[in-house]
Amino acid sequence: MADEPDLWVAVLHISDRTAEKIHSKHWITPDEVRQAVVCVTGLDYGWDDDPERGMRALVDCRIRGARVIVVLYPATEPPDDVYHLGSAYPRNT
């Protein structure tokens, strides 16, 4: 996506509500998202400053061979490698 410093996701929090949303709408499981982004080097991503939702990382990855956008919000507590899942959905190319 962009020439940004490497994004490292050590911990990914996924709420029950978000887990249900991504599974019911896109048939993507929380485990699939974790496998795609947690402790994965060289993530392809860019930062997006949404006026309503704030700063978030949009990660372009593959789940079951399909391109998927994973939306990550930085956690407010340290360390800097902890994120909350906002969404995960198939990328329209």
Image: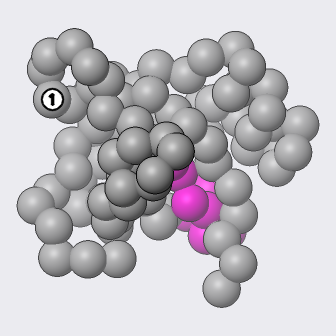
Q: Nearer the viewer, residue 52 or 39?
A: 52
Q: Is residue 77 left or right of residue 24?
A: left
Q: Percent from the top left, x then y, of residue 36?
A: 47, 48
Q: Is residue 63 covered in magenta?
A: yes
Residue 43, relative to residue 88: is it above or below?
below
Residue at the location (70% across, 78% down)? Answer: 92
If the image is split into quadrants, where does the N terminus sit?
bottom left
Residue 29 picture location, percent across and down: 71, 35
Q: Quadrant of residue 78?
A: top left
- In the image, residue 36 above or below residue 22: below
Q: Which residues are magenta?
A: 62-71
- The kind of secondary structure element at disc 1 is loop
Residue 65 on the magenta segment:
yes
Quarter that holds the C terminus: bottom right
Q: Is residue 63 visible?
A: yes
Q: Is residue 88 above or below residue 23?
A: below
Q: Which residue is identified by label 1?
A: 80
Residue 21: percent from the left, percent from the top? 79, 33
